[in-house]
Image: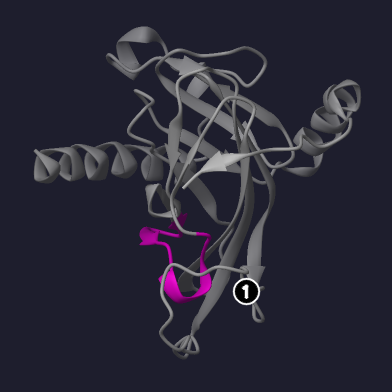
């Protein structure tokens, strides 16, 4: 069953790679072109279907609210307080770089949700990268209602690309795709996000 899930995920991710590299906006597809996939915006809560979002926006997916605070390349990635692996981190190979994302996930429902850094992927050029466990964390946790978890996610890939973050949690039927906005998109996003800025949640979680 896990093998079938990974094969399905790889197929959908391959489709997304084609969309991004072709410069297409998924929401402009007709239902026939999109097949059975439902595309949702970040302005409302989606119960299922793929979601496209941008860095700095609150993305509502089912009972969760996901915010990618930063996403980009870095030669000196920050280290999380708790790492997935205690092994010594290795330097990137020649011609490669680290890409890092700062993500917050909040659970708004009574039912706990499991947040695992390994459910995040990154499209870098034509490649799909998994998290670098020695530079990513914290460990997976179950979030109770109104609890949140801040994650530091590090990926390794070829130099010179704009990364696209993919979140595929098992409790949501769809892929959540986040990228950095272009200058035009960024100005529109800033205007729309002014009304959502506020204090941070105080959270508790169940390990």
Query: Quick one: SS at disc 1?
Result: loop
Residue at the spot 19% in from the left edge and 37% down from the top edge:
8
State which quadrant residue 57 falls in.
Answer: top right
Residue 199 vs residue 66, the one in the foreground: 199
Residue 114 vs residue 103, the one in the foreground: 114
Residue at the spot 74% in from the left edge and 39% down from the top edge:
56
Whether residue 110 appears in magenta in the rendering, the answer is no
135 shown above or below 5 = below
Q: Locate residue 49 relative to residue 15 in the image: left or right.
A: right
**Number of numbered labels in the structure image:** 1
State which quadrant residue 50 falls in.
Answer: top left
In this picture the colour scheme is one colour
155 shown above or below 128 = below
Residue sitting at the far top = 31
Q: Sort mark 1 into few (<14), some (14-19) or many (20+) by Cα contacts within 10 Å.
A: some
Residue 152: give x, y in percent of width and height: 59, 60
Residue at the spot 45% in from the left edge and 55% down from the top edge:
122
Q: Quadrant of the N terminus?
A: top left
Residue 190: give x, y in percent of width and height: 86, 32
85 shown above or below 145 = below
158 shown above or below 44 = below
Q: Locate residue 25 relative to residue 44 in the image: left or right.
A: left
Residue 184 vs residue 140, the one in the foreground: 140
Whether residue 128 appears in magenta in the rendering, the answer is yes
Residue 10: give x, y in percent of width and height: 24, 45
Q: Locate residue 36 relative to residue 82 in the image: left or right.
A: left
Residue 125: give x, y in percent of width and height: 45, 60
State which quadrant residue 33 falls in.
Answer: top left
Residue at the spot 67% in from the left edge and 46% down from the top edge:
180
Point out the stretch of residues depicted in magenta.
123-138
**Badge 1 is on which residue?**
79
Q: Locate residue 104 relative to residue 125 in the image: left or right.
A: right
């Amino acid at each position: 069953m896990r093998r079938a899930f990974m094969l399905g995920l790889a197929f959908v991710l391959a489709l997304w790679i084609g969309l991004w590299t072709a410069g297409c906006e998924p929401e402009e597809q007709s239902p026939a072109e999109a097949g059975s996939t439902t595309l949702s915006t970040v302005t409302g809560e989606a119960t299922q279907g793929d979601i496209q979002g941008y860095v700095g926006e609150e993305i509502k997916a089912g009972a969760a609210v996901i915010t990618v605070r930063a996403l980009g390349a870095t030669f000196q990635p920050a280290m999380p307080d708790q790492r997935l692996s205690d092994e010594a981190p290795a330097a990137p190979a020649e011609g490669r770089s680290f890409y890092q994302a700062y993500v917050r996930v909040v659970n708004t429902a009574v039912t706990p949700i499991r947040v695992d850094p390994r459910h995040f992927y990154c499209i870098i050029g034509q490649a799909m990268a998994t998290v670098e466990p020695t530079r990513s964390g914290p460990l997976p946790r179950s979030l109770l209602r109104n609890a949140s978890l801040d994650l530091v996610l590090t990926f390794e890939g070829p130099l010179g690309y704009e990364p696209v973050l993919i979140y595929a949690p098992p409790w949501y039927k769809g892929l959540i795709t986040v990228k950095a906005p272009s200058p035009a998109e960024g100005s529109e996003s800033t205007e729309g996000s002014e009304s959502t800025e506020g204090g941070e949640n105080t959270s508790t979680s169940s390990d």
